[in-house]
Amino acid sequence: MTIWIEIDLCNGCKLCMKACPYGAVELENGKAHILERCTSCGACVEACKQKAIQTDAQPRSIPDFSDRKGVWVFAEQRHGKLNRVTLELLGKARELADTLNQDVSALLLGHGVSDLGETLISYGAQKIYLVEHPTLKDYRTTAYTQVIQGLVNQFKPNVFLVGATHLGRDLAPRVSRRVGVGLTADCTELEIDPDESILLQTRPAFGGNVMATIANRYSRPQMATVRPGVMEAEERLDNKGDILKHEISLFEEDMDTRVLEVVKEKRRRVDLSEAKVIVAGGRGVGDAGGFKVLEDLAAAMGGEVAGTRVAVEEGWIPSDRQIGQTGQSVRPELYIACGISGAIQHRAGMMNARYVIAINKDPRAPIFQVADWGMVGDLHEVIPEMMAQFKAGRNE
Amino acid sequence: MDIIVLVKQVPDTTEVKLDPKTGNLIREGVESIINPDDLHALEAAVDLQETHGGKVTALSMGPPQAIDAISEALGMGVHEGILLTDKAFGGADTWATSFTLGKAIEKIEEYDLILCGRQAIDGDTAQIGPQVADYLNIPQVSYVCEIETIEEDALVAKTRLEDGFERIHCGLPALLTVIGELNTPRYPLMGRALDACKEKAPIKVWNAADIGVQTSQVGLEGSLTHVIKTFAPKFKRETEMLEGDTREMVGDLMGRLKENRLI
Ligand SMILES: Cc1cc2nc3c(=O)[nH]c(=O)nc-3n(C[C@H](O)[C@H](O)[C@H](O)COP(=O)(O)OP(=O)(O)OC[C@H]3O[C@@H](n4cnc5c(N)ncnc54)[C@H](O)[C@@H]3O)c2cc1C
Ligand SMILES: Nc1ncnc2c1ncn2[C@@H]1O[C@H](COP(=O)(O)O)[C@@H](O)[C@H]1O
């Protein structure tokens, strides 16, 4: 495919330059000009209000999807334990479904897992498709794919969300290919477009330097995997739902994989997604001893300690406590950033905190732009003072 | 044991920055590299070949300059490289990419194992492996951190989970997506890498017609998802800077925390 500019139509508004993720459009004599590095991604075509950017791509008609209804959530469980991301997805799914005036369903696959249905209902599922079978006891990609393919073809959902966990990122692409739909990975924002009623899927790209909003116009269900820790779970104790048992036939002989052994390693990954208070440190903390002080403050406040990639690379905290683009996303009530500059990749993991406190000796550090309360100062003085006043306050 | 390795050339995203004025990516001076996970896939393939024999092919879809990635793979000991390049492949989402790679693999025909990286650092989707496997109708094992045993028709692999690992028995042919823990990639041998740049180098370049696809099935036109907007991440808050000496600032803070029932 090629993209070109109809010079006469271009008014030099630069919208295309803003839209181009590759910096491949420039202004030349007041008109847009496409550079060699263009990858034909088409983002500029969408952006141009003058219809000055043209392509030789055939205009595609959008099929009629009016029979596609319902927002589905894949209920991830391993060994009978629900992954928390499922509840977060249900929270988001309800919001999307309310906008669309449709229902939320959860897909629960496994063996001896029916008692999880109640939890799914209390977090917003209105229908549960329950599929129980001995071959589904351990998660296996192709068996789960086959079952989900059957359900999707029979019940024709509109939207299908899967957690972007290890399991979800193994399963969702396989399902998407099988049922013939597009898939957006690792979304951090989802909303319904008010005009087209389609799902707008926003995700970080290029190591978090850019956010991209992606639409899935040509296939249904609109599938996305969603980053854990980003959406908000909401308990709805008055919610009512039905559990529908779905029968399938699968045979162990047909399975192409077998799980020989599952080995749990203790505390391989600390789950920071449920922490109410997080005390996070960066390069400014200086050494492992400095982190001990942060840990004490976290412990006093009933929270967890975490840090930036620099803190992990320096070996001051284990890698499972890294916050950010390549670490965990968190949404605590309170996030205390100590000696952290506030790089974009770090912000990506903590922007959903309810309140942010920043302590940094550099008043121009970007972390202050994303903090509710900022303190310019040396953390080695500020933190002990916080500890002292916090303790004094508690003893009052 | 015939092995196909999927290799992607990516911009070194640690170098990619946003132009503060235009909000565009600055790609000038950003080096193109083999996607880091794919180096581990290449290492595993060459290593398996050294013990079990057979042929290793590196397959990449990308712009013409992605040939550098293939040369580097040949330098590591891969026998043959195939570059899928065509204007028509541009702007592909993972649906169209997995279709294109799948078609090329069908043309290669002979394989026992396909190795790819878990994810590419430019998109971080981790979708291509599973989607290619589904297109070819073969099983996949994701996040492989160890290949324990491999025989004619099956292998046992260890895969990483969030809280441990699993050992999986999988029939062949199969596709594995691998992570860094699997091995330490060797450096390409200078001599071999140079040979790989010569005219007689075992590199094939295929376009859309060569793999028998219509332009409407690939690239942007064959994609099901489309980027409709990109923007710089914004997470601004109304910041209140606390004033005074340390004791005063912290005192002020404690008051606000109490006010908001945070402590
Ligand atoms: C692809 C990619 C992915 C990445 N993923 C992540 C990620 O997931 N998470 C992450 O955190 N980073 C990530 N990074 C790295 C990120 O870009 C930054 O380099 C990193 O977050 C900086 O860490 P820092 O704030 O600890 O260090 P610095 O940027 O060095 O900041 C240290 C700060 O401490 C302040 N300071 C120093 N001494 C004191 C003191 N005594 N008292 C108070 N303040 C003090 C300084 O003024 C400075 O602002 C990623 C980068 C890339 C390219
Ligand atoms: N254009 C491509 N050419 C060859 N292999 C690719 C391509 N895109 C992705 N892959 C392979 O798929 C893996 C996952 O990529 P992704 O799904 O883009 O994160 C990569 O590590 C590569 O092994």
Image (cartoon, coloured by chain):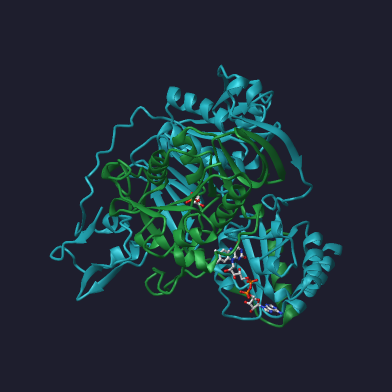
Q: Residue at x 82, y 71 (%)?
A: A388
Q: In this rendering, would A317 be left or right of B69?
A: right
Residue A170, percent from left and from top: 56, 41
Q: Please identify the quadrant where the N terminus of chain B is shown.
A: top right
Q: Is residue B171 visible?
A: yes
Q: Residue furthest bottom?
A: B245
Q: Is residue B231 visible?
A: no
Residue A84, by quadrant, is top right
Q: In this rendering, would B84 be left or right of B47?
A: left
Residue A347, percent from left and from top: 57, 64
Q: Tell me which chain appears green.
A: B
Q: Residue at x 30, y 53 (%)?
A: B86
Q: Residue furthest left?
A: A8
Chain A on-screen colour: cyan
Q: Nearer the viewer, residue A122 or A42?
A: A42
Q: In this rendering, would A353 be left or right of B100?
A: right
Q: Classify the position of ligand 1 by quadrant: top left, top right, bottom left or bottom right.
A: bottom right
